[in-house]
Amino acid sequence: TGAVWHDIQNVARRRFPLVELVLVPASVQGPQAPAEIVAAIEHMCMLDDIDVMIVGRGGGSPEDLAPFNDESVARAIFASSIPVVSAVGHETDISIADMVADVRAPTPSAAAEIVLPDILELQERLADHRQDLIQIIEEYLAETGHAVDRLQRRLLLQSPAIHINRMRR
């Protein structure tokens, strides 16, 4: 129900609505938070078909962000078999989690922007590639057609006497 989750969902709907998001909830402040964050990271690593993991929370005081400076959280992020984007706090907030993650994003929304392609850009690139392929195929067919035409003309224009004389040699 957190704002971070809604922000990531909004970015995902806009940039790449085909993506399947997986939420593994954990407390992000308080004494229980480091253990829950570690458990969530380890849980994600056990799931199939996870391409990237965003570990994050919205801004807050240094005390609120303290779980992301916890050694156990840092070790879990570093040990993750899945690439991790750290998105803790706001742009000016820096945590140990940011330093050990594969990528640091200034905000959770920016993390979603980093990991998700822009579907409109992908569609444009696919349309360009489609046009390139059509042009290549058309050129190939034209060249092949010309070669067939040349062969047919060569066979049709030659008299049977020429064929017989070649065979005698």
Image (cartoon, helix red, strand yellow):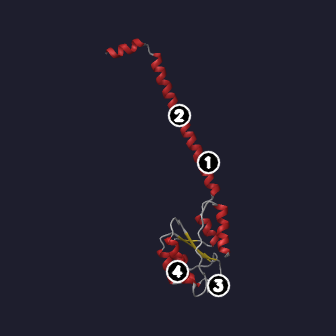
Q: Residue at x 49, y 20 (%)?
A: 153
- Horizontal and vertical percent for residue 23? 60, 72
Decide: few, some or many residues near mark 1? Use Cα within 10 Å; few <14, some 14-19, many ≥20.
few
Contact check, label 4 and label 2, Cβ < 8 Å: no
| Circle 4: element type | helix
Mark 3, residue position: 61
Image position, residue 152 (x, y; %)? 48, 22
Q: Nearer the viewer, mark 2 or mark 3?
A: 2
Q: Is residue 167 left or right of residue 8?
A: left
Is 8 or 32 nearer to us in this picture?
32
Image mark for residue 73: 4
Which quadrant is home to the C terminus? Answer: top left
Q: Which of the two labelled residues, at mark 4 and mark 3, occupies the earlier sequence position?
A: 3
Secondary structure of the residue carrying numbered label 3: loop
Lower sequence index among marks 2 and 1: 1
Residue 127 bears which disc, if any? 1
First-in-chain label (4 vs 2): 4
Disc number at residue 141? 2
Closer to the N terminus: mark 1 or mark 4? 4
Cα–Cα span, label 2 and label 3: 67 Å
Amino acid beneath label 3? Ser
What's the CA distance linking mark 1 and mark 4?
44 Å
Extreme residue toward the left, this view:
169
- Disc 1 and disc 3: Cα gap in Å? 47 Å
Disc 2 from disc 1: Cα separation: 21 Å
Farthest top residue in view:
161
